[in-house]
Amino acid sequence: MKHIVLTTAMLAFALCLQAKDDVKIRRNQVGHYPKQEKVVVVEGANPAGKLRVTTPSGKTLKPKVTRKAVSPWSGKTRYIVDLSTLTETGTYQLTLGKEQCNLRVSERPFHDVATASLRLFYLIRSGVPIEMGGEFSRPTGHPDTKVLVHNSAASPERPAGTVINSPLGWYDAGDYNKYVVNSAFSIGIMFAAYEQNLDYFKQLSTRIPESNNQTPDVLDEVMFNLKWLFTMQDPFDGGVYHKLTTPNFEGFVMPTDCHQPRYVVAKSVTATLDFAAVMADAARLYEPFQQDYPGFSAQAAAVAERAYEWAKAHPRAFYHQERLKDPAVSTGTYGDGNASDEFFWAASALYRLTKKQQYLDDALQHQPKNFTAPSWGNVMSLGTFEWLSDQGRRMGNGDLREKLVSQLKSYCDGLVSGVAQSSFQSPFGNKPNDFGWGCLAEQCCCNAVALLYADRMLGTQQYQRYALENADYLLGRNATGYCFVTGFGDQSPMHPHHRISEADKVAAPFPGMLVGGPNPGQQDKNDLNGQTYPSNYPDESYADVMQSYASNEIAINWNASLVAMLCWLDAIL
C-alpha cells in the first residue's frame, strides 16, 4: 500500500511539472479586489500585442506591458502587465498563444481562503473526534490522558514516570506532537490581528462546534489550544514544559494508529515566557466573554504571573534536546539560546495587563534596537505589537511607543524599496535570504502583517498595496506557478508533508494549509525517494512531494501567519 501511494505521488508530481513548464502567465489564482492593483507576470517572450483579455461582458482588450524584469538567479526574462483598470466583477479570460487562464475579480476575493486558513486549526485538533470535518472527519486520536513526565522534567513533586493529564491542543505541523513555543507564537500573531480587526472577527464563522456561542470563533479556536497550554505548566513551581512529544516522529499513519508513549520534557525559559505572554493577553481578551468562559481571565492572569516568576528565577534554562536521555528524543526542537525577545514580549503583555512597575522596567531593559519580522524564534515584534495596540496608547511611556513606531516604519520602508524593480511586483521574493524553511510565512505573510501594522499606526494606506502584493505572490504570482495554499487556485499543493492528509485515504489534502515554500537549502534532498527538486534557483526550489519536509510541510505558526495576513486584508479591503 505504501509503495502504491508513493508511486502515485511521484507520478502526480511529474505531471504537474510537465504541465507547469508550459505555463507562462503567473497571476494570483484566487482573486482580486475591484479597486486594487491587478498585476500578471508573463515569462519568456514579450507579450505586447499578443496577450488578450476577454472581459466578463465579452469585450476583448490588449493590455500594455508596464516593464521588463530579469531574474537575478535564473536570468529568465519576465514582463509585468498591469490590469488594474479592470474593475468589473466577474471572471476574465487571459489568452497568450495556446495558453488560457482566468483572472477573477470580486468584492471579497480572500474571504473563503481566509476562512479556510483559520478553520484548518479545527481540523488539526488533538484529543477529540473531528465530527464537523466533512470528508476529513475522524475519530479521537491522542487523548493524552496518560502522559509521562520525562526525567528531564522531573521534580520532587512530579518524579520521572509520573502520569499527568494533558489533552486537547493542536497538532503542531506534519507531525503529531505539541510544542509550547510554537503554539504560543501562533496564538500571539492571531491575537495581534484579532485586536486590530475586532468587528471583522466578531462576524467571522468557521463552522466549528463552538460557533453558536457568544465568543468569536477565532477566540473559541484559540481557547482549545489554551486549555492544553494550561496543562503544560508545572502546578508546583510555575515552570512550563517545553513540549509534549513521542521520543521519535510517528510514521505516516492516522492518529488512532499511533502507539508510542508520550512525554512532557524539560522546562525551558523560552516556553515559560511565551506561555506567560499569551496567558496575559488571553486574560484581557476573554474578559468580555465570561458567559462562555467564566473565571478564565482571572485564572490566566494568575498562571501568567507565576510563569514569569519562574522565568526570572531561571533565565538560562534553555532547551537542550541533545541532553535528553532514557529515552532520547529526536522530534522538533524549537530551541533558542536567547530569551531577551521572550522577556520583552512577556513583560510588555504583563505590564499591559497589570500596570505593575516591574514589568515596565523589564520591558525597557529588553526593548528592541530595531524591528524584526515576527517568528517563533524571535518574538520581539509581538512585544512591539503590545505597545502599538490602541490600548498601548494608554500604557504610558510614550517615548518607547514612538521609538517602536519609528522602527516599524523604517523596516517597512526597507521592505518596499525594491518593488519597482522586482520580478513579481512584490516586496517578498527579491533577495536570496527571502527563501528558506517556512519562508512563505516568516518572510511573506509576517512582513505583510508588519506593513498593515505600519498603516494602522501611521494613519495611512501607503503600505497596504504592498501587503496585498505579498498575498498575490503567495497565491500564484511567483516563479513556481503554485498557489501555495491547499485547496485554492488552479495549481496548489496536493502532497504536503502532513501525516493525516497522507494517511486518511482522501485524495485532497486538508484545505487552507500554507506550505513552507521554496527552500534552496533542500535539507531533504536525500529523502525524496529518487525525486529531485525541479530547480536549484532560490525562488523555484520547491517540490510538491510528501517527503519534502523542507519545502512542503505545514505548521501552525505558518498557518497563523496566513490567518493574520489574509483576515486583515479581508477586513479592510
Image (cartoon, rainbow, N blue to C red):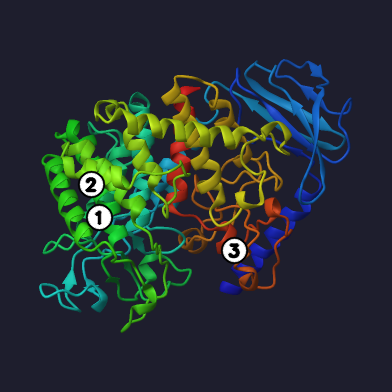
Whether residue 333 is visible to the viewer of this picture, yes or no, is yes
Task: Say what amino acid the circle numbered 3 marks.
Answer: Ser
Q: Which SS class for mark 3? A: loop
Circles 2 and 3, Cβ within 8 Å, touching? The answer is no
Of mark 1 and mark 2, the one earlier in the sequence is 1
Task: Say what amino acid the circle numbered 2 marks.
Answer: Met
Of mark 1 and mark 3, the one earlier in the sequence is 1
For mark 3, what is the residue? 548
Task: Say what amino acid the circle numbered 1 marks.
Answer: Leu
For mark 1, what is the residue? 229
Q: Residue at x 39, y 53 (%)?
A: 124
Neighbour tally class for label 3: few under 14, some 14-19, many 20 plus, Cα within 10 Å:
many
The quadrant holding residue 296 is top left
Neighbour tally class for label 1: few under 14, some 14-19, many 20 plus, Cα within 10 Å:
many
Side (left or right) of 363 relative to 548: left
Side (left or right) of 229 relative to 523: left
- Mark pair 2, 3: CA separation: 35 Å
Of mark 2 and mark 3, the one earlier in the sequence is 2
For mark 2, what is the residue? 279
Q: Residue at x 18, y 73 (%)?
A: 163
Indicate the position of residue 329 as horizontal and vertical percent values: 37, 76
Circles 1 and 2, Cβ within 8 Å, touching? The answer is yes
Circles 1 and 3, Cβ within 8 Å, touching? The answer is no
Q: Is residue 355 above or below residue 528?
A: above
Q: Is residue 191 above or below residue 173?
A: above
The quadrant holding residue 567 is top left
